[in-house]
Image: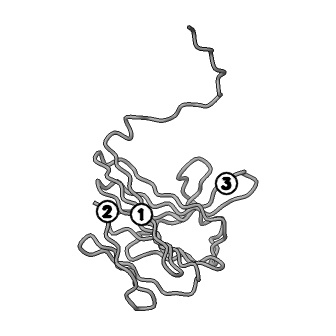
Amino acid sequence: MRLPVLPDSKTRVEWDDSAYKDVVFRRHITVSDDLLVDIITVDNPYSQIVDTTYLVDAQFLSALKKEEYLKVLHPNVLAAKEIIPEPAAKFAFQGFTLYCYSPGASTLYPGRGPNNPSTSDIEYLIMRSREQRVNHIVVTDLSGENDIKLKVEKKTLTVRVNDELTQLYPLLS
């Protein structure tokens, strides 16, 4: 018996199996009080570029001027100056604050690019690394009012809120 021929879905196959060979991605998300803690760990044995991209549908309170977006990161995504997220980089939005942190050799690019649908722009926060073990950490203060400090020691993330120890999170291994 012959199976029917399915119509072409017009979907382009762009997945590169060899690019993901031996790469392991882990993500741990925890919500506690006014905090959302997102820990991303990537085992990257061949030192390829690893991007962690956050799309934020809000405008930075200290808005970057259009001429500050100088670097093209992806097609149609322009980035501003590079930031080393050690200590954590703070981005304030109306009603909440994001803290981006990486204990390793990562670079953070605040950017702007098309929303979906692309009738407007959206803010991008892109952390980039080539390390063999990548740890990218984003903490969202949903109140937007706390002072947050992040530090990694002995494979454990310490989160301090308003100078009080709040949580310890083991980094995935």
Tag 1: amino acid: His
Tag 3: amino acid: Pro
Left or right of 8 in this view: 83: left
Kindly report the distance in space between the C-alpha atoms of the residues bearing marks 2 and 3. Answer: 33 Å
Question: Which residue is tagged 3?
Answer: 114
Which element type, helix, strand or loop, lies under badge 2?
loop
Question: Which residue is tagged 2?
Answer: 172
Packing grade of label 3 (10 A; few <14, some 14-19, many >=20) is some
Tag 2: amino acid: Leu
| Residues marked 2 and 1 touching at CB (< 8 Å) | yes
Instruction: Select label 3 or label 1 by which is in front.
Output: 1
Q: Give percent across and percent down for residue 129.
A: 38, 57
Left or right of 153 in this view: 80: right
Q: Give percent across and percent down for residue 41.
A: 36, 59
Question: Which residue is tagged 1?
Answer: 28
165 above or below 112? below
Tell me which corner region of the image, top left, top right, bottom left or bottom right, holds residue 21.
Answer: top left
Q: Give percent across and percent down for residue 152.
A: 31, 74
Q: Tell which circle, 3 or 1, labels the residue nearer the N-terminal end.
A: 1
Packing grade of label 2 (10 A; few <14, some 14-19, many >=20) is some
Quadrant the C terminus occupies: bottom left
Q: Tell which circle, 2 or 3, labels the residue nearer the N-terminal end.
A: 3
